[in-house]
Image (tube, helix red, strand yellow):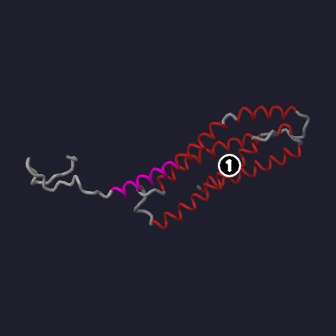
Amino acid sequence: MCGGATGREHTWSSIAGHSCGRYKEQEKSAERAKRDLYRYMHYHNRYKAHTDSFKIESKLKETIQGKIAISEEKDSTLRDYSWVNNGLSRLFRSRRVLSYSYAFAFYMFGDELFKEEMTDAQREIKQNLFEDQQQQLEANVEKLSKILEEPFETFSDDKVVEIRMQILTLSTIIDKLCQKM
């Protein structure tokens, strides 16, 4: 009736070993499936957020080039704006690193792939360290993104020098965090 196994004594008049009316323990597998889905969605949403930010920020390159052109035309002591382009390339690269780090974490700290290579305690410690580095990288990437969007072409030379130092500092921090990951 239910498609389940009936056993050897199954005949037209009696069904021996038929389990159609019995309760089967499905709660554990349903809870696991639900947990796995939530876990997948968490990592996927974080991955998607950074890939979407990357797409939006890719338009920033044209804006930055316009800001540089305006700044170079001003009567200013500052002539070199390569630091802006370097900061922008670091932003793009770190966005890619961040987005891929979520896919890496999904597989690395899941239950299937490296089950035999780490104990649960080791996995938890490594996952916490990895997620802390991810969080630090994400915070610094967001700061860099915000600073690069500043209208520096309208600022005084002193303010531009201050922004330059912030971008250089954040670029160095981001490079180190990317290397650690």
Residue 162, percent from left and from top: 83, 49
Where the C terminus falls, by quadrant?
bottom right
Q: Position of residue 81 (x, y in %)?
A: 79, 39
Q: Residue at x 53, y 50 (%)?
A: 42
Q: Is residue 181 left or right of residue 25?
A: right
> Residue 134: x, y in percent?
60, 54
Q: Position of residue 30 (x, y in %)?
A: 38, 54
Q: Circle 1 sits in a helix, a strand or a loop, which is it?
A: helix
Residue situated in front as seen by the camera: 35 or 117: 35
Residue 40 counted in the magenta span? yes
Q: Quadrant of residue 135?
A: bottom right
Within 10 Å of the Cα at label 1, are there few (<14), some (14-19), or many (20+) other Cα atoms?
many
Horizontal side of residue 151 vs 4, given as left or right: right
Is residue 138 rendered to the left or right of residue 75?
A: left
Residue found at x 56% / y 46%: 47
Tag 1: amino acid: Val
Q: Name the residue that disc number 1 marks.
A: 141
How many dots with numbers? 1
Q: Main secondary structure of the magenta part?
A: helix
**Residue 105 lies in the magenta-colored region:** no
Depth order, front residue of 76/154: 154
Picture layout, residue 70 above or below residue 113? above
User: Foreground: 112 or 26?
Assistant: 26
Question: Nearest the camera: 111 or 88?
Answer: 111
Query: Please, which residue is most extreme toward the right here?
Result: 75
Residues shaded magenta: 26-41
